[in-house]
Image (cartoon, rainbow, N blue to C red):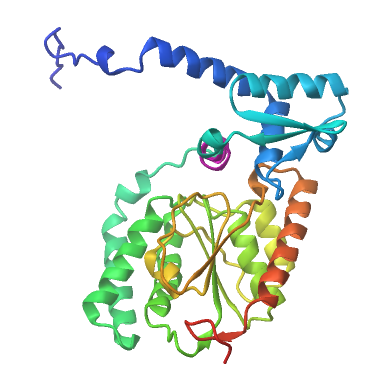
Amino acid sequence: MTETTLTGQDCAPIAAQAIDTGPATVLAATLKGLADPLRLRMLSAIATDPRGESCVCDLTELAEVSQPTISHHLKVLKEVGVLESERRGTWVWYRIKPGRRAAVTALLEAFAPAALTTDISTEELAGPEAAELEARVARLADELAATATGLGRETVLRIVRDSYVALARSAKITRHLIPLTERFAKQRLADLTRDGDHAQAQVLFVCVANAGRSQLAAALTHHLSAGRVIARSAGSAPVAEVHPQVRALIEELDQHEVTVFPKPLTDDAVRAADVVVTMGCGDVCPIVPGVRYEDWAVADPALASAEGVAAIRNDLADRVRALLDSLPMTVHRSGAES
């Protein structure tokens, strides 16, 4: 084995590309202000409050601490520029500063779940069984191409391979990749061939990880509509598996298929939907004419206690019922009931 000795000429001048001292100091002060469990819980509660703001009287329920302690933590969050407040009568109301909303969303919806997820090794994907997986993907593509109607063989092959690659990026156990690829590819093919003139109503729920809110909302939609509404879910940055507490809730609904798994968001899923409901994933969905869009401020079950998960489930159930009341079971793309 040959060893390589680096010289001064080989080293890249990375110091000049690093964040400047001034911005780094400001950023460190902000992160220090956020680095407290109760403050993060307060921030999460305010960010997901359907009213768009929270009264200090609501926030006192987050912990058994004194009112001055609550006020101190809120003051810190204001000082680092995350919150703003307004006094109304005897109470003070807090909201996320408009200019910080995207940053708070990124912290709570992307960074927090990632920080709590154990790193998954992808060595299996490049191991000895990689060739066998590729062969199985090719066979699956041929099988689906033989049964697909209205789509060319090349289109089906592309959908199957794209589905496999997308799921493989977050695969935890490769032995599940082929059956999951088949399920995901069939959904995508159904979306591509959906008859928009006379079809069951279809709703797409989108969050970041597709491991909690969106999965549970889709399961509730299927359950509460008795299967009369097609419910899909997807994630802007899907993880490897559905959160255990959410999976348990879905199984309690006695779903006809409880093999739920995180799936990436596709343009085809958006185009096939009559309603797209986003939950904390930002402006990731393409705007398609004729599709109705809603944004639900719902907390992430992956970050909640058991009691919190139950509350989120009840909140979603109420929202889904209201959505179903506004949606005919069979729709035209124009939205008229059949």
Quadrant position of residue 138: bottom left
Q: 284 and 192: which one is in front?
A: 284
Is 263 colored magenta in this rendering? no
Number of marks in picture? 0
Task: Please name the residue shown 58% across and 88% down the image.
Answer: 337
At which x and y percent is residue 51? 72, 48
Q: Quadrant of the N terminus?
A: top left
Q: Is residue 150 left or right of residue 90?
A: left
Q: Quadrant of the C terminus?
A: bottom right
Task: Please name the residue shown 51% across and 16% down the image.
Answer: 28
At which x and y percent is residue 85? 70, 30
Vertical order, 277 against 151 (above or below): above
Q: 95 and 190: which one is in front?
A: 95
Is 109 colored magenta in this rendering? yes
Task: Please name the residue shown 59% across and 33% down the image.
Answer: 97
Q: Is residue 49 left or right of residue 212?
A: right
Q: Is residue 272 left or right of residue 53?
A: left
Bounds of the magenta segment: 105-116
